[in-house]
Image (spheres, rainbow, N blue to C red):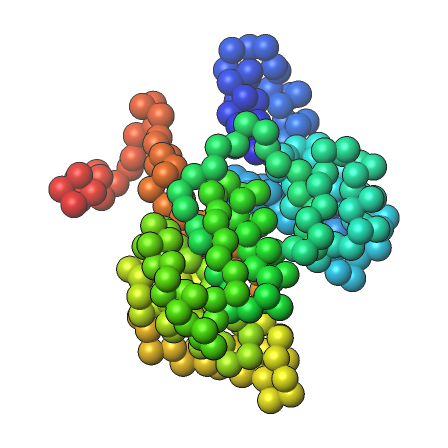
Amino acid sequence: MSPEALERLLTEVREGTLSVGKAIGQFRSLPYEDLEFASVDHHRSLRQGFPEVIFCEGKTATQIRAIARALLKHHRPLLATRATRQVATVIKRVDRRAVYHDEARIVAIRDPKQKLQGHVLVITAGTSDIPVAEEARVTAEVMGSRVETLYDVGVAGIHRLLDRQDRLMRARVIVVVAGMDGALPSVVGGLVPCPVVAVPTSRGYGASFGGLAALLTMLNSCAAGVGVMNIDNGFGAGCLAHRINVLGEQPAVSLPHSVKPKNKMNVKLRAEG
């Protein structure tokens, strides 16, 4: 259940248009819905601001269809990662608004009322890194961030990056995706004041060890303010970048006037702080 749906439900109870019994009935699917093979977490949007995401690898088409239906009963948007075209077809039969992003391997249903916020910049070292970068881009956009991309500007031709420093400086958070030696996040981290999310990819020759070399390079970065995701984890990078990007955009949750805090000393300290 989304925050908006929960607020609407409580308002209906308060105004007497919905009985307490019927409201309890609607809450019975919370905080999760048991599908036997999956426990769909309908509370996640309340806790984290975005519904549960379907990770499609290892799931059957029947399982994905059932999970998508359960989520769409309560939530918009929907995000399904590591999806094939066949999976996209399955989800489109559940909701025709589903869109398949081929390079990102993501099926998404966006909230048409959503306004994109802030500014995330996604950068790749090479063209081969674009699929992971696209996973990050689509994830951040569906979650509500305004995203720009800057691809193929790796350290083998660093002038391609330096020529666009103005774009780096406009970003609120930057995702840097790189394979091979994984050096680009350190370069970007040394140029910008904003947080940098580094993503190692499995692209590279034998000694890259499937992205391990790039991962270790990023973990050993000498640039301050660089955080590192797991190998090929574009989704995780997009999610983290979005959360950083919208900090301060969302209003703080305030208690109703009828709710009085028990700890007066704590309230006083907050006011003075």
In the image, what residue occupies the spot 31% across and 62% down?
192
In the image, what residue occupies the spot 43% across and 39% down?
117
Q: Report x, y in % for residue 10.
A: 52, 22
Q: Relative to residue 28, is residue 60 drawn left or right?
A: right
Q: Report x, y in % for residue 120.
A: 44, 50
Q: Out of 31 and 162, give the one closest to the viewer.
A: 162
Residue furthest left in the image: 272
Up/down of 258 relative to 73, above or below? above
In the image, what residue occupies the spot 34% across and 59% down?
165
Q: Report x, y in % for residue 35.
A: 78, 46
Q: Out of 267 and 160, give the one closest to the viewer.
A: 160
The answer to whether residue 11 is seen in the rendering is yes
Residue 241, picture quadrant: bottom left
Residue 246, picture quadrant: top left
In the image, what residue occupies the spot 55% across and 27% down?
113
Q: Out of 80 and 47, give the one closest to the viewer.
A: 80
The answer to whether residue 235 is seen in the rendering is no
On-image quarter of the C terminus: top left
Q: Report x, y in % for residue 137.
A: 55, 52
On-image quarter of the N terminus: top right
